[in-house]
Image: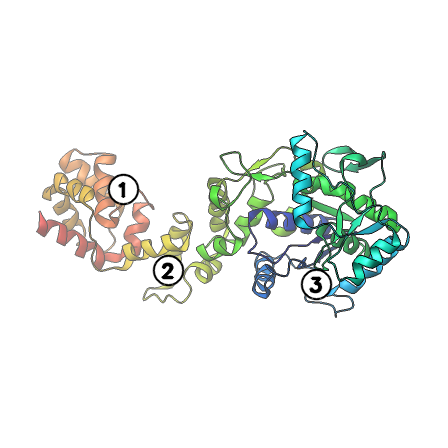
């Protein structure tokens, strides 16, 4: 079996098309099949080489290696649709010769007028068939005059087009509502509808997982395949992704490019685990490797209802992925090119502490400032808390810091005994004094990472300032 991912290189990969790629990849891997990458670049005005490169880079960054496709292939068997025009021409000629397709010389303005008229009459807009009955002589006259011509597929009238969708069950369409659709555009490039179907057939694609917005394309592509004698693939039309405003996901309501997420610092494993659960369910919410995501992937678990994209959910998976990092992996990903003048044991404690308290690299930078900067600048609220806590509190601490191995519990007990304070009354001022934060890692870990020198420096500064 073989699945495929066939993006248009008109922009960066976003959440929606990466999820489509992932589902196709997972299904292929689960069934020991092949995963194909094809570039649908028939929109020459918007397609860019840089986007083709970024598509491949994003897929590889998430571990979605393809078995067949770009950049494999010469012009003859290329996986770039712009290089397959001669192949499509063969099938245009076949359809025209068999009177299954015809040249259309209608201008864009004529088509717009026809559409407006149909809508004003409450009719679904479709091609009115003006060029359908042109004689051979009329067609030759138009071609000799170099008039621009598209090619339309001649849709049979009054037939039902039925197919079984893996997600949505039996689907039935009335051919009368389709209209004769374009298979070659006036600029000579293949339409998506045609090139997509022909390539799937010639490349032996057996299963197509794509967004439900393509559902109405399927009857047209089925007609093309049936007419040309090709086998049909199995279709699974997956739910669309929407924003919290219940509208299709876009930049306006939260969509992000995969490149941007990776640059911010989201881990590939976090992105994969989240995307695999948008419109698909797993038995539990454990963090899974890419291989395990494939093993446990099932078409039976694809859902019909729209899936809501939620950054909070992505952050949940990011947290799990960060916690799952080994010490070495965390150091490589989050602390790359940063040197530390500390022992291995202290470095390991630093990394363990960071893993439990950060999501993204920017947060790591903030915590490194807390642990290694000589001076802390307290914000106004925290400075006021330190002031209200009083000098006696910090003097007790300063006395204890004369010992080499001061423990947080011992510090707590002494303050409790001498000042009668307990719980948050003790721990909050200590935490603020050391980190300028009200929440964070265990205090003992903070003290161990700071070391006795910085501990003394910060408390002495506080005492001198009170």
Q: Residue at x 76, y 35 (%)?
A: 177
Find the distance from the CA under tag 2 to the CA under tag 3: 54 Å
Nearer to us of marks 1 and 3 is: 3
Number of the label disc, if any, that sits on residue 438? 1
Q: Is residue 426 left or right of residue 357?
A: left
Number of the label disc, if any, that sits on residue 458? none
Nearer to us of marks 2 and 3 is: 3
Q: Residue furthest right?
A: 98
Find the distance from the CA under tag 2 to the CA under tag 1: 24 Å
Are there few (<14), some (14-19), or many (20+) residues within 10 Å of tag 1? few
Number of the label disc, if any, that sits on residue 82? 3
For label 3, the SS is helix
Depth check: give the residue in front, 240 or 408.
240
Depth check: give the residue in front, 14 or 87.
87
Which residue bears the numbered disc 2? 347
Q: Residue at x 22, y 57 (%)?
A: 454
Q: Residue at x 81, y 53 (%)?
A: 201
Residue 296 visible to the viewer: no
Depth check: give the residue in front, 31 or 137.
137
In x, y percent, where is residue 431? 25, 45
Residue 457 visible to the viewer: yes
For label 1, the SS is loop
């Amino acid at each position: 079996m073989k699945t495929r991912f066939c993006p248009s290189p008109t922009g960066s990969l976003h959440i929606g098309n990466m999820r489509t790629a992932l589902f196709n990849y997972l299904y292929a891997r689960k069934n020991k099949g092949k995963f194909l990458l094809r570039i649908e670049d028939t929109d020459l005005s918007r397609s860019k080489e840089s986007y083709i490169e970024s598509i491949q880079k994003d897929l590889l960054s998430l571990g979605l290696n393809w078995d067949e496709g770009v950049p494999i292939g010469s012009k003859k068997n290329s996986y770039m649709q712009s290089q397959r025009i001669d192949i499509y021409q063969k099938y245009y000629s076949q359809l025209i010769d068999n009177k299954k397709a015809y040249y259309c010389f209608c201008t864009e303005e004529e088509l717009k007028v026809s559409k407006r008229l149909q809508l004003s009459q409450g009719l679904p807009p479709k091609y009115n068939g003006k060029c359908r009955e042109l004689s051979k002589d009329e067609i030759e006259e138009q071609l000799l005059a170099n008039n621009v011509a598209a090619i339309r597929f001649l849709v049979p009238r009054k037939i039902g087009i039925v197919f079984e969708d893996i997600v949505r069950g039996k689907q039935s369409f009335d051919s009368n509502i389709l209209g004769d659709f374009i298979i070659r555009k006036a600029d000579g490039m293949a339409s998506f509808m045609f090139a997509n179907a022909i390539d799937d057939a010639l490349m032996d694609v057996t299963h197509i997982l794509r967004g439900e917005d393509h559902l109405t394309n399927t009857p047209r592509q089925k007609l093309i395949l049936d007419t040309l004698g090709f086998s049909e693939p199995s279709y699974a039309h997956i739910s669309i992704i929407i924003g919290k405003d219940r509208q299709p996901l876009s930049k306006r309501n939260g969509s992000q490019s995969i490149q941007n997420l990776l640059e911010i610092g989201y881990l590939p494993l976090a992105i994969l685990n989240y995307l695999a659960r948008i419109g698909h369910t797993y038995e539990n919410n454990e963090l899974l490797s890419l291989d395990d995501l494939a093993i446990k992937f099932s078409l039976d678990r694809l859902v019909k209802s729209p899936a809501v994209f939620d950054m909070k959910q992505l952050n949940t998976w990011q947290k799990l992925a960060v916690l799952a990092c080994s010490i070495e992996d965390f150091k490589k990903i989050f602390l790359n090119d940063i040197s530390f003048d500390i022992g291995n044991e202290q470095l390991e404690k630093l990394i363990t502490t960071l893993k439990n308290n950060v999501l993204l690299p920017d947060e790591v930078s903030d915590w490194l400032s807390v642990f290694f900067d000589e001076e802390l600048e307290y914000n106004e609220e925290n400075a006021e808390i330190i002031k209200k806590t009083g000098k006696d509190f910090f003097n007790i601490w300063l006395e204890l810091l004369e010992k080499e191995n001061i423990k947080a519990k011992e510090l707590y007990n002494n303050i409790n005994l001498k000042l009668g304070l307990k719980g948050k009354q003790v721990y909050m001022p200590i935490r603020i004094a050391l980190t300028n934060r009200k929440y964070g890692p265990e205090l003992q870990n903070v003290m161990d990472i700071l070391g006795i020198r910085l501990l003394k420096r910060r408390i002495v500064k506080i005492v001198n300032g009170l």
